[in-house]
Image (tube, rainbow, N blue to C red):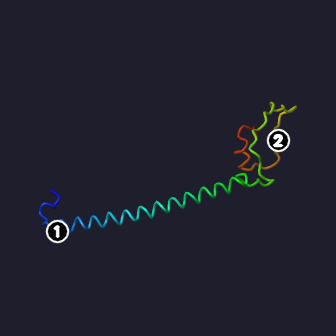
Amino acid sequence: MSGLDELTREELIALVLKLHETVELQAKRIIELEAMVQAAAERISALEEELSKFGGSKPKPAWVKSNAPNEEKGPRKKRAQSFRVFLFPSLPLHPLDILLFPTYTY
């Protein structure tokens, strides 16, 4: 099966002792890690308490816009006269004129 059937009694005892040592080392490491986690949790709670004393955050600079909702704006005013781009036939046409104003009759 797993190869343990072919081992002698002495080899099995040595294997069990080695596994026992490994388990003991892992248990010691777990205790150390739990102590580290506890110390970190205490440090975090101390920092959170210190932060709560100051109100949580610094005041914002004057140039920062507030997050106030935008006010409702009314409809835009219509122009009295429509806006129109005038091109003069006496001036030479530039290729961009044709691209920018394709509906204009030259």
Element at label 2: loop
On the image, the x and y values in percent for residue 88 come to 82, 44
On the image, the x and y values in percent for residue 62 come to 81, 53
Position of the C terminus, as image quadrant, is top right
Say which amino acid is labelled 2.
Phe
| Quarter of the rendering containing residue 72 | top right
**Residue under the image location 39 percent in, 65 percent down:** 28
Q: Are marks 1 and 2 in contact (CB under 8 Å)?
A: no
Task: Tell which of 104 and 40 is nearer to you.
Answer: 40
Task: Tell which of 65 and 59 is nearer to you.
Answer: 59
Front position among marks 1 and 2:
1
For the residues labelled 1 and 2, the Cα–Cα distance comes to: 102 Å
Q: Which mark is residue 11?
A: 1
Residue 83 vs 63, above or below: the answer is above
Among the two numbered marks 1 and 2 on one chain, the one whose residue lies closer to the N terminus: 1
| Quarter of the rendering containing residue 71 | top right
Task: Tell which of 87 and 48 is nearer to you.
Answer: 48
Name the outermost residue toward the right.
80
**Residue under the image location 21 percent in, 69 percent down:** 14
**Residue under the image location 84 percent in, 32 percent down:** 77
Position of the N terminus, as image quadrant, is bottom left
Q: Which mark is residue 86?
A: 2
Q: Left or right of 11: which side holds 65?
A: right
Q: Which mark is residue 94?
A: none
Task: Tell which of 4 and 38 is nearer to you.
Answer: 38
**Residue under the image location 24 percent in, 67 percent down:** 17
Q: Residues within 10 Å of mark 1 (few under 14, many from 20)?
A: few
Residue 47 vs 14, above or below: the answer is above
Q: Residues within 10 Å of mark 2 (few under 14, many from 20)?
A: few
On the image, the x and y values in percent for residue 10 come to 15, 69
Say which amino acid is labelled 1.
Glu
Element at label 1: helix
